Image (tube, grey):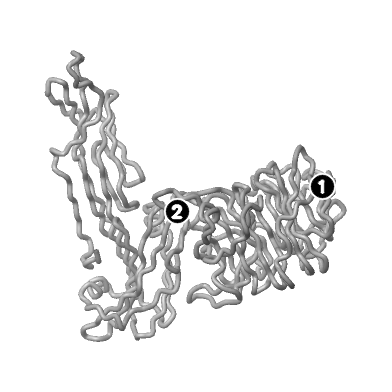
C-alpha cells in the first residue's frame, strides 16, 4: 500500500477481547482429576502502526480461569515480554516505538502458568532531505502515474542478498526525463520507508544509513523487501510521477560475524572492519606511520584474529608474525627468521604454511622455525590450509615468481595427518593454454574450494573469473556466474567469511565471500578502481549443479577513494592495547 503522505497518523487496531489465548495444564477427561487453572491473555491479537516515530501502546490483561469457571484478574502479578525487539513492556503495557517491525509473540507468566498472544507492528517512516519541501509526500500521493517519467534503478540489482547487519545501503538510479524530485520507497508487509530527495540527474543516489537500516535489516531476517524510485518534475503545475521497475532485496537470517583486514594501496595502509560494528567505517590498523615507515602489503590472519603475518616491501621481502593486540613483531622482521609471499595459518594459530620462491614450508608461529618442507613436485604458490586443518591446497607454476607467477598451472591438495603431509594429489589439471589458477581457498566447512582462473596477472587480470570445485573432486568445477557477471572486472583475491549462515524461509545454508574488483559502483564510481565486494555462495545449489552464487554488493565501510585489495577474514577483531 502506498503511503498517503499524511504525517503523524496514529493507527491502533486491537482484536476483540473475547478472542483470548488459553495456555496451561489440565485434564478435561472424565477420570475424576480436577482440571488445572489456565491463564488467559487479552488481546489475543494486536496490530499497531507506528508512523514517523509516534509510539503506540497496547494494554494487556491477564486472567486466571479456574476449573469452576471463576475468573480473577491477575495482571498486576503477571510478568510480560515480547520477542524480536518489537517493543518494551512497562508493567502490562506494550509500547512500540518503531525501532523494529514484524510479527511477534507476547508472553505472560504468573504462578507457573503461561499464556501467549500475537502482535504485529508496522512502521511507516518518512525521511525528507532538507532540500526537499515538506509537502513532498503529499505531492507524490496526489500525482498521476506516467510510465514515461520512470527512473531506472541501477544499484542494487534485483535478487541481491545482503546480511541484516550491513549497516548502510546505497540506492542508485538514473533519470533522463527531467525529474527533479524523487521518492525512494522500501516496502514489505510491515514496513513503508519513504525517502524524499532532490538530487542531480541523470545520476542520483541516496544512502539508507544506520537508523533506517536498523529497521530494515533486523526486521526482515530471512525475508525480502522491494525497492522502487518515483520521479516527478515539481516545477510544473500538475506533476505526474513515473515509477521504476521494482528491485527485490533479500536479507539473510543471521548477521555476518567476524572481521576483515584489507590493504588500501593508495592510502598505504592495512585497514580492518568489525562486522559486529556495521555503522562505522573501517579503521586504519597498520602502515608506514604505525610500522617505522615500511610498506605492508600481503598479509594473512590466524583464524582467531590474534596473529598477523605480514610481508614488507613486496615480492620476496622480509616477513614477520605480529601480535595483533600490541602490533609488535613476534619474530625478527629483517628477513633473518622469515621471508614469505603468501601465508596460511593452521586453525589453532600455532603454525602456518608459507611460500617463498616457489617452496612451501610448514613453520612454527612462535619461532618461525621450519617444521617440514612440503613435497610439491616443483614450484608452488598460494597455499591455503582448510579450516579443519586436515588439508592444504596450492597451485603450481613454472615461470615468474610467487607474486607474479606464469607458465602452466595445476591445483593440488595435500592431506595432513598427525602433523605429516601426504603426497600431492592433483585436484585440477591445467585450465587451458595461457590460463592459470590463483588464490584457492577452502569454504568454512572445508567442502568447497573457491579460486580464480586468469589469463594474465593473478593480482590484476581484467579477464579473471571466479570458480568453485569440491575439495574431494567429486564434481566438475563450476563458474560463479551471478557473482562474476562478465569479464573485465578483475575479480580476484576471493576469500570466505569464517562462518556458515542461512537465508530464506527454508533456512537455506549460505556462505559469504569477498573479492577485490574494478567493477563500477552504480552511479557513484566508474570502473577502474579496485574495491571490496561481497556475495553469497549456496552450497546446496552447487551440489545440485546450479549456479551457486548471487549478485555482488559493495561493502559500505570502505573508502571509495582508495584502491582496496587482499581482504583476509578472521573470526574476531582484536582490540589494540
Q: Quadrant of residue 270?
A: bottom right
Give the SS element for disc 2.
loop
Q: Are marks 2 and 1 in contact (CB under 8 Å)?
A: no
Instruction: Tell which tag, 2 or 1, sits nearer the viewer.
Output: 2
Residue name at image x 75 percent, y 61 percent: 410
Residue 271 appears in the figure: no
Outermost residue, top side = 32
**Crowd tier of the residue under label 2, counting other residues whose Cα lies within 10 Å: few below 14, some 14–19, many 20 or above:** many
Question: 224 or 106, which is in the foreground?
Answer: 224
Which quadrant: the N terminus? bottom left
Q: Which residue is mark 1?
A: 368
Question: 508 or 325, which is in the foreground?
Answer: 508
Give the SS element for disc 1.
loop
Asked if residue 256 lies left or right of residue 175, the reply is right
In the rendered image, the vertical position of residue 128 relative to residue 109, given as above or below = below
Instruction: Give the total of numbered labels.
Output: 2
Q: Which mark is residue 501?
A: none
Q: Which residue is mark 2?
A: 252
Amino acid at each position: 500500500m502506498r503511503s498517503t503522505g499524511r504525517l503523524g497518523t496514529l493507527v491502533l487496531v486491537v482484536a476483540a477481547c473475547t478472542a483470548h489465548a488459553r495456555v496451561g495444564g489440565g485434564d478435561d477427561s472424565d477420570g475424576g482429576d480436577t482440571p488445572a487453572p489456565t491463564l488467559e491473555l487479552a488481546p489475543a491479537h494486536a496490530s499497531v502502526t507506528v508512523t514517523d516515530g509516534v509510539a503506540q501502546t497496547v494494554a494487556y490483561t491477564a486472567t486466571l480461569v479456574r476449573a469452576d469457571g471463576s475468573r480473577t484478574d491477575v495482571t498486576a502479578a503477571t510478568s510480560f515480554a515480547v520477542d524480536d525487539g518489537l517493543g518494551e513492556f512497562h508493567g502490562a503495557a506494550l509500547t512500540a516505538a518503531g525501532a523494529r517491525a514484524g510479527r511477534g509473540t507476547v508472553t505472560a507468566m504468573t504462578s507457573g502458568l503461561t499464556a501467549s498472544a500475537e502482535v504485529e507492528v508496522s512502521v511507516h517512516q518518512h525521511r525528507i532531505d532538507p532540500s526537499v519541501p515538506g509537502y513532498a509526500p503529499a505531492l507524490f500521493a496526489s500525482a498521476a502515474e506516467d510510465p514515461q517519467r520512470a527512473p531506472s534503478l541501477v544499484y542494487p540489482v534485483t535478487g541481491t542478498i545482503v546480511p541484516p547487519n550491513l549497516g548502510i545501503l546505497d540506492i542508485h538510479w538514473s533519470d533522463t526525463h527531467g525529474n527533479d524530485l524523487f521518492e525512494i520507497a522500501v516496502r514489505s508487509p510491515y514496513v513503508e520507508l519513504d525517502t524524499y530527495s532532490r538530487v542531480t540527474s541523470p545520476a542520483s543516489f541516496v544512502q539508507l544509513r544506520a537508523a533506517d537500516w536498523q529497521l530494515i535489516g533486523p526486521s526482515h531476517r530471512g525475508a525480502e523487501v522491494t525497492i522502487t524510485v518515483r520521479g516527478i518534475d515539481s516545477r510544473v503545475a500538475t506533476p505526474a510521477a513515473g515509477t521504476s521497475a521494482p528491485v527485490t532485496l533479500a536479507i539473510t537470517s543471521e548477521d555476518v560475524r567476524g572481521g576483515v583486514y584489507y590493504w588500501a594501496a593508495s592510502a598505504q595502509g592495512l585497514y580492518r572492519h568489525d562486522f559486529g560494528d556495521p555503522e562505522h567505517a573501517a579503521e586504519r590498523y597498520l602502515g608506514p606511520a604505525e610500522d617505522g615507515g615500511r610498506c605492508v602489503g600481503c598479509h594473512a590472519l590466524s583464524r582467531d584474529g590474534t596473529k598477523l603475518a605480514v610481508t614488507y616491501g613486496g615480492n620476496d621481502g622480509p616477513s614477520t608474525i605480529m601480535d595483533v593486540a600490541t602490533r609488535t613483531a613476534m619474530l625478527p622482521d629483517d628477513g633473518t627468521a622469515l621471508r614469505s609471499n603468501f601465508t596460511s595459518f593452521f586453525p589453532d594459530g600455532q603454525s602456518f604454511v608459507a611460500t617463498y620462491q616457489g617452496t612451501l614450508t610448514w613453520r612454527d608461529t612462535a619461532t618461525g622455525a621450519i617444521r617440514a618442507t612440503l613435497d610439491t613436485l616443483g614450484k608452488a604458490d598460494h597455499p591455503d590450509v582448510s579450516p579443519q586443518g586436515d588439508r592444504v591446497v596450492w597451485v603450481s607454476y613454472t615461470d615468474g615468481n610467487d607474486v607474479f607467477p606464469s607458465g602452466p598451472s595445476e591445483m593440488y591438495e595435500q592431506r595432513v595427518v598427525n602433523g605429516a603431509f601426504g603426497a600431492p594429489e592433483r585436484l585440477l589439471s591445467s585450465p587451458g593454454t595461457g590460463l592459470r589458477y590463483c588464490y584457492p581457498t577452502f569454504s568454512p566447512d572445508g567442502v568447497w574450494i573457491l579460486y580464480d582462473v586468469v589469463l594474465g596477472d593473478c593480482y590484476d587480470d581484467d579477464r579473471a573469473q571466479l570458480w568453485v570445485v569440491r575439495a574431494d573432486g567429486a564434481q566438475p568445477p563450476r563458474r560463479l556466474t551471478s557473482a562474476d557477471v562478465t569479464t573485465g572486472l578483475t575479480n580476484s583475491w576471493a576469500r570466505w567469511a569464517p562462518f556458515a549462515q542461512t537465508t530464506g524461509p527454508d533456512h537455506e545454508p549460505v556462505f559469504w565471500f569477498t573479492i577485490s574488483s574494478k567493477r563500477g559502483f552504480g552511479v557513484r564510481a566508474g570502473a577502474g578502481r579496485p574495491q571490496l565486494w561481497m556475495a553469497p555462495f549456496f552450497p546446496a545449489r552447487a551440489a545440485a549443479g546450479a549456479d551457486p552464487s548471487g549478485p555482488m554488493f559493495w561493502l559500505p565501510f570502505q573508502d571509495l577513494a582508495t584502491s582496496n585489495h587482499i581482504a583476509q577474514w578472521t573470526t574476531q577483531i582484536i582490540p589494540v592495547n
